[in-house]
Amino acid sequence: MSRPLVVSVLILLLWALVSLVGCSGRPSTSGLLERNGIKGAGDLVLCVINLAESNRYYVIKDESTLRRIYSTINDAERVTGMTKALRPDTVTLVRKGGRTLSFGFTVFGHPSLTVGYASPEFVKFVETEIRGNSKYVNRARIPEFSIGQVVRIVGSSSTPLPPARAGRVQDVVRLMASAYVPYSWTTKPTDWNSIAANCTSASPGFEVTLVKPVSFETLVGSTGPEPNGSDALKLKTLTVDKMLVYMADKELLLAFHSGKVWYVTWGFGEKQLGGRTPENVYRELAGR
């Protein structure tokens, strides 16, 4: 074999070896959602998008839109310099089996998705095709219900209210229940002792018993911790037989009793109370 031919063969062998090593040594890449256990859009049953700055809530269930959402979030790029202050909104992906993954992101300003990641494509998609689209507006609400007994709660004791007072409490409970948005309002499990600790003679709670329990599906848990999202939320069906309104840390709260567990919503503000302050609504509730 001639020397030039030997050299050529050696060069080819060296190139092949380098290519082989390069391929085997190349790190495997996976998207943000894949690394969080969501392998494809087929793993999702719905997506909840909350735009806090515009007080809008959206629920997406159709497969084609879920595929686009999955693709743009999964392809999020790792970046630096983001802070939680830039991310007032949330997107929650609900997986089959009820588990979820929740991220902070913002439509307004920097196209961020969660701490350390950005997806301009996802933010653009939300801005142009989700926000303001009536097709995706979250219209889920608590079903209509009838109220039976109404009682005043002070610690562990309860006192039935006369009809006139009971009617006032019923009006407030209906107002708050109609403002509650399943899926979009985070609802946390709690216990009776935690609730009763806030129900004093100076600031009693008011409990209503429903004539017939009502059922609705919602997200239960919390959206933390950061940075890559959380599965601390779960999709759950609540069958509610009692509701309770009370004040805690100057917030007006609504609690649901389902099974043997109490669940409490986040605080109601003026937007949810028809422009009235929580303090004014509570004074009406307490007959002051």
Image: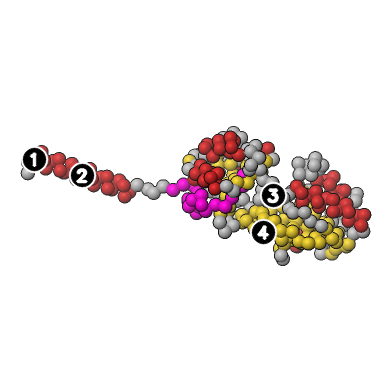
Residue 186 image offset from top left, x and y in percent: 67, 51
Q: Is residue 190 visible?
A: no
- Measure the alpha-carbon separation of dots 1 and 4: 79 Å
The residue pinned by badge 4 equals 237
The residue pinned by badge 2 equals 14
N-terminal of the two: label 2 or label 4?
2
Q: Nearer the viewer, mark 1 or mark 3?
A: 3
N-terminal of the two: label 1 or label 3?
1
The residue pinned by badge 3 equals 140
Q: Amino acid at mark 4?
A: Thr
Residue at image coords 61%, 56%:
234
Q: Are marks 1 and 3 in contact (CB under 8 Å)?
A: no
Give me the disc on residue 3. Answer: 1
Instruction: Using the image as rendered, state which of residue 194 and residue 113 is in the foreground.
Output: 113
Q: Secondary structure at mark 2?
A: helix
Q: Quadrant of residue 91?
A: top right
Residue 124 image offset from top left, x and y in percent: 55, 35
Q: Amino acid at mark 1?
A: Arg
**From which residue to which does the magenta span run?**
30-51
Residue at image coords 84%, 53%:
170
Q: Secondary structure at mark 4?
A: strand
Residue at image coords 75%, 56%:
255
Q: Are marks 2 and 3 in contact (CB under 8 Å)?
A: no
- Measure the alpha-carbon separation of dots 2 and 3: 64 Å
Q: Amino acid at mark 2?
A: Leu
